[in-house]
Image: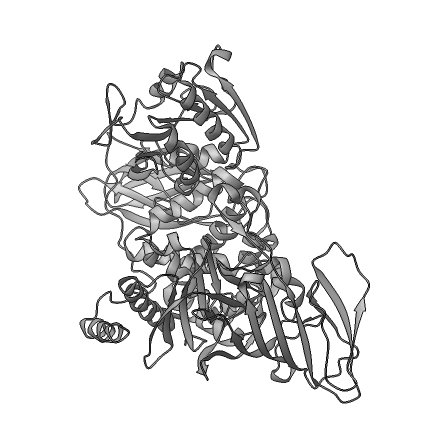
Amino acid sequence: MLPHILLLGVFSFWASSVFCADELIHHKLNVGLDPAEHQLKVIDQITLPSADLADPIFYLHRGLQPRSSTPGVKILPVKQNPSVMVEAFKLVLPADTTSFSITYKGTLYHPLEGYGKEQARGFRDTPGVISEEGVYLAGGSYWYPEFDTQTRLRFDLSVKLPKGWQSVSQGEYLSVDNQAHWHSPQPQQEIYLMAARFTQYTRQSDGPTAMVFLREPDEALAHKYLEATDRYLAMYASLLGDYPYQKFALVENFWETGFGMPSFTLLGSSVIRLPFILSSSYPHEILHNWWGNGVYVDYATGNWSEGLTAYLADHLIKEQQGQGAAYRQQSLQKYTDYAAKDRDFPLLEFRGRHSSASEAVGYGKALMLFHMLRRELGDDVFSRGLRAFYKQFQFKTASYEDIRKAFEEATGQSLADYFNQWIQRVGAPALALSNADNEKTTEGYRLSFRLQQKQMNNTYHLRVPVAVTLEGQDKAWQTDIVMNQKEQDYELNLPAKPLRIDIDPEFDLFRKLAREETPAAFSELFGSQQMLVVLPADADADLLKAYEAFAADLQKMGPDNVVIKRDDELESLPQDQAVALMGWSNRFYNDFATALDDYEVSLQGEGVTIAGEALSKKDLSLALTARRSDGEKLPISFIASALPEALPGLGRKLPHYHKYSYLAFTGVEPQNQLKGRWPVTHSPMTVLLEGSAEQAELSKRQALVQPPAEFDANRMMETVRFLSGLN
């Protein structure tokens, strides 16, 4: 993820779509940091482009009191609202002066704060902070003069810090006279400066340098990231073109983040130690150096980088593991649960993630746009278009229109209608299958069926995958059909008797899923517009108090309207809203148990058995969700714990498990023991023509690029010898 803070500070400086070498501002910064006092002191030697910049305006964090020692240079304050954290200044320069010095110092300290619905997922942010925990300074911190022009910048940065501290920034690391220097010759949109008491690990190679900065020494962890860095840089270079920077660094942050900056990523302490991060978030942040930090985003016309990065990282990794269809199903379910109601918006309006709904559109819909484009063009042409786009726009600002033109050049055909349909429109197609029948013919069988687009808005032009299971054949008969009307009838001539038809069986289309196509998941609960939380009135005082606090946390997890009641205040459960039941003694527990009739679950007695796994209730915290059989089949969830102390931790963790149907945790600080999704048993996109035929095997697909080798004995020994030499 590109840092959320980018949108707060430097958006207005990214309008230019054309870069010329002589338009760059150059900063030569000499920075001293005093974390204990939250202060910085800076001497910035600035060189402006040779182009005429009459009385330029620059912005700086309030209270830094800039001065210039360059003869004839004047810095004049511009009147503005004193409540804003940024001050504006007009720079008066002598004729023909393009290089001058600005000195400033002061306090820069904004404590971390949660924002929006993302607070429930533990997301916090700051415009900038200098503290004893660490230093985080970005463009939005206004810690260096930012000019009110459309120019980008290059910089050289020297940093003086307390003993034991190290800094991290973009570009190449140089150590001169025991002082850290960062050299960034590539055009940048802003300057980052991170610092803390790091232990640094570095591995040189013929390509980019791999670096790791940890807050506590951990050679084994560093080795994993150094190895992974080399693998992913090689994989993406083979797919897209050369990596654009001299190094890539993993930097451990002092709060939980998943930020991708040019040439490094800033990840939280807990995040980097999660076992799955090396094959999920980490390649995502590395890839941002091609998309977002290598080719810049024209935010005014939509942030395309998160969707493309999600497709070529998160989705690609799952595709390499044979789980691409499941990933797409979960992405479409997230869109359906969070955004497909009144929270939807066009991709052209996506700037950055600030809620689950904005993520479902900006990441999920966008990645499906690229997936469908790939299926339309084929892997070779799709890859060629990506490489051409990257080569043409490296260190330039690009839009969806620029992406379209790059693929049009690769294909020689117009893609205007395709892009307009998916980036300008709100909503998604919703398909319905009906009238499926078959008859014997002289040459085999004829299968007929009807497809409808049920959405309220205009018709979409779709290429719909179809899979037919045939009698006596292990492999499915597959094809794509074109749909450009609200309702169309189709006939397929088949070589054998059809037993079953599946529409879009691998979730290749961006569409609003029918409820029965997906298992119940907590995303349905969090995405609901109204939720009733029912507390167990007869629970003991400590447990009831813990449930009340948990219910209050649910109000922050996404639902628009949450009502909390005790079970003795209700005669029955309403049918027109989602319900979350708390506690084993809840009077309405049987309503939930009825919703589990189709699944392999036993919650009786002293233990719990789910999907064949048996667990004791003794120190168990359980969260399950299903759908009611009455009314609109809205979600009904059940959350129970034997430990009041465990419920705060469960409340923190549950939003991160939104794609699951059932979860089991143990201990006071809940540790996950079991997670999973209920099976889908009655998809309306499937029609059984005879009996209860299982779906035949679908054609195997190749990943867009093969995964990098995970183990190289020679490289491992090289790293072991290097790390041993640090002691």
Residue 615, image quadrant? top left
Q: Quadrant of the C terminus?
A: bottom left
Q: Above or below — where is 543 with respect to 304?
A: above
How many numbered circles does the render carry? 0
Please name the residue shown 72% across and 56% down the image.
84
Determine whether, in the image, residue 663 is placed left or right of residue 345: left
Measured as percent of width and height from the top left, residue 173 is found at 44, 78
- 421 horizontally vs 80: left or right: left
Viewed as shown, does residue 618 lie left or right of 164? left
Front-lying residue, 678 or 166: 166
User: At 39% from the left edge and 41% from the top edge, which residue is drawn?
Assistant: 657
Image: 470 above or below 133: above
Q: Residue furthest bottom?
A: 96
Quarter residue 672 falls in? top left
- The location of residue 594, given as percent across then percent down, is 34, 19
Q: Find residue 482 and report its horizontal and vertical position in percent.
A: 45, 50
**For this view, does 591 lie left or right of residue 453?**
left
Spot occupied by residue 63 in the image (x, y as percentages of width and height): 70, 63
Query: Which residue appears at 47% of the width and 70% of the height?
Result: 168
Q: Residue furthest top?
A: 571
Quadrant for residue 246, please give it: bottom left
